Image (cartoon, rainbow, N blue to C red):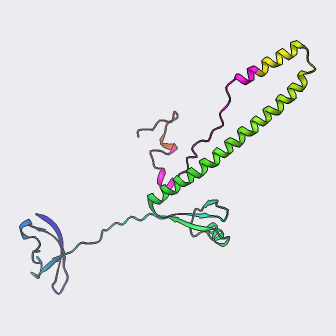
Amino acid sequence: MALIDVKCHGSVEHRYEVERPAAMWPATPDCPTCGATTEQYHPQPRMQYRVEPVVLYRGPDGQIRFVGDANGVSAHDYRQRGYEEIRLQGVGEVRRFEKHMNAHEYSRAVRRAEKAQENREAREKHTRSQLRDVMTSMTPFGRALARAAISKNDNKPRPQEHARDPGFHSDVYSNDRSNRAESRDAQGRRRRD
């Protein structure tokens, strides 16, 4: 037996939940109150979940700005200044945006790391040229000591300036009780409460 929702065609539209034997399908039983014929209907779900969109603004220079309230003062200000409003509806759009932003921020971090490496190498080159100028006036023992210091400096491990994953994410879709800081103990392990 299947449990179905029916409404009767009588003068007062009664609505019931009734059991229908499988052999009776697709017919429906008569109304238990007035005896009129009935038809099956599918009621709307009582609870509907709706997620507000994630609203952000892209400036003319490509910079992204987030606002707390899509109808607030900041949002109005960004619209007046010519920022493009972007509404991300649902997890799929948010994840695509996060992926795009992480790729963008990673490329910026790579460029910063390369620039830092170039600057360090330029400083070392300048310092070495100054040291070589000073070495011309040193004693042979002093020059040998300076060469040993240069050799030791060349052979030590260099700090690697490398780009890290920026870890850009939307808190709305990424943080729940399992990954918030307050659900972890002092050693960073998940609490089991």
- Quick one: 94 or 190, which is closer to the camera? 94
When asked about the image quadrant of residue 42, the answer is: bottom left
Question: Where 151 sits versus 87, above or below?
Answer: above
User: Which quadrant does the N terminus fall into?
Assistant: bottom left
- Quick one: 153 or 137, which is closer to the camera? 137
Q: Position of residue 67 (x, y in %)?
A: 59, 62
Q: Is residue 153 magenta?
A: yes
Q: Residue furthest bottom?
A: 11
When asked about the image quadrant of residue 110, the answer is: top right
User: Which quadrant does the C terminus fall into?
Assistant: top left
Residue 170 seen in the figure: no
- Count of labels in the image: 0
Q: Position of residue 157 (x, y in %)?
A: 67, 26
Which residue lies at the image location 81% right of the left edge and 19% below the top edge?
147
Q: Position of residue 48 (x, y in %)?
A: 36, 66
Which residue lies at the image location 93% right of the left edge and 20% below the top edge?
137
Residue 60 seen in the figure: yes
- Quick one: 19 or 14, which is closer to the camera? 19
189 on left or right of 157:
left
Question: Where 57 sits versus 98, above or below?
Answer: below
Judged by its main secondary structure, the magenta piece is loop
Q: Is residue 169 magenta?
A: yes
Question: Where 111 sits versus 138, above or below?
Answer: below
Q: Residue furthest right?
A: 137
Q: Position of residue 98 (x, y in %)?
A: 52, 54
126 on left or right of 34:
right
Q: Which residues are magenta?
A: 151-180
Question: Where 31 sits versus 22, above or below?
Answer: below
Q: Residue furthest left?
A: 23
